Image (cartoon, rainbow, N blue to C red):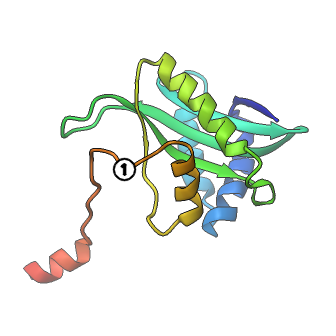
C-alpha cells in the first residue's frame, strides 16, 4: 500500500468509497471539496490523502488546520476518512491517519480532532484505538424546526 496526495482524477473513487459507508452518492459535494483541497494552490494547512494498492484507490482522508472560536488553539481537524469496505481492518485508515498527523505536525499544530456520530461504532472504535479520547470541547446542537415551532 502507498499513501499519496489525492489528485483531481481521484474524485470518482472518493465518491464511490463514501457511498459505501453513507449509502448515498454525493458527487456535487465532493466536487466542491476537491475544488478547495485537491486543485493546485490549495492551502498549506490542508491534507488530502489517498491510499493506493496495486494502482487502485482503497482509501482517503481529508483534513485541515483550523482555529475555532471559544478559545480553541489551532489544531489538525480530520473531517473525512473512508476505506473500501472489502479492505477494512488492514491498516489502511491507520496509515492515512499517521501521514495526516505527520503533515499536521509540520504545520505546527500539536492536537488532532475529529467529530463522529455517536452511533457510528466502527468509526469510533477506529479513532479510539488510534489514541483519540473525549476532548475539552463538547459539541451541542439544536433542531431549527423545533425552536421555530416553540417561538411561533
Residue 10 lies, in percent from the top left, at 73, 41
Q: At 19% across and 35% down in the image, what residue appears? A: 71
Residue bearing mark 1:
134
Determine whether, in the image, residue 84 is placed left or right of residue 24. Answer: right
Name the residue at the left extreme. Answer: 151
Residue 97 lies, in percent from the top left, at 60, 37
Viewer can see residue 24:
yes
Residue 130 found in image quarter = top right
Q: Nearer the viewer, residue 119 or 53?
A: 119
Quadrant showing the C terminus: bottom left
Q: At 24% across and 71% down in the image, what residue appears? A: 144
Q: At 64% across and 63% down in the image, what residue appears? A: 21
Q: Nearer the viewer, residue 44 or 8?
A: 44
Determine whether, in the image, residue 112 is placed left or right of residue 125. Answer: left
- Identify the secondary structure beneath mark 1: loop
Name the residue at the right extreme. Answer: 54
Residue 8 found in image quarter = top right
Q: At 79% across and 54% down in the image, what residue appears? A: 87
Viewer can see residue 38:
no
Q: Residues within 10 Å of mark 1 (few under 14, many from 20)?
A: few
Quadrant showing the N terminus: top right
Q: Is residue 112 above or below residue 120?
A: above
Residue 51 lies, in percent from the top left, at 74, 38
Q: Is residue 105 above or below residue 91?
A: above
Residue 118 found in image quarter = bottom left
Q: Nearer the viewer, residue 136 or 54?
A: 136
Determine whether, in the image, residue 83 is placed left or right of residue 142. Answer: right
Q: Is residue 13 above or below residue 69?
A: below
Amino acid at each position: 500500500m502507498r499513501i499519496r496526495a489525492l489528485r483531481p482524477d481521484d474524485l470518482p473513487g472518493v465518491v464511490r468509497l463514501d457511498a459505501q459507508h453513507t449509502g448515498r452518492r454525493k458527487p456535487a459535494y465532493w466536487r466542491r471539496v476537491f475544488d478547495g483541497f485537491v486543485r493546485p494552490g490549495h492551502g498549506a494547512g490542508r491534507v488530502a490523502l489517498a491510499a493506493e494498492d496495486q494502482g487502485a484507490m482503497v482509501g482517503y482522508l481529508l483534513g485541515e488546520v483550523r482555529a475555532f472560536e471559544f478559545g480553541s488553539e489551532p489544531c489538525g481537524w480530520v473531517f473525512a476518512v473512508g476505506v473500501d469496505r472489502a479492505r477494512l481492518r488492514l491498516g489502511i485508515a491507520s496509515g492515512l491517519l499517521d501521514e495526516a498527523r505527520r503533515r499536521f505536525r509540520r504545520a505546527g499544530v500539536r492536537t488532532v480532532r475529529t467529530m463522529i456520530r455517536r452511533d457510528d461504532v466502527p468509526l469510533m472504535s477506529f479513532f479510539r484505538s488510534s489514541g483519540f479520547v473525549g476532548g475539552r470541547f463538547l459539541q451541542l446542537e439544536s433542531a431549527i424546526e423545533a425552536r421555530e415551532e416553540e417561538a411561533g
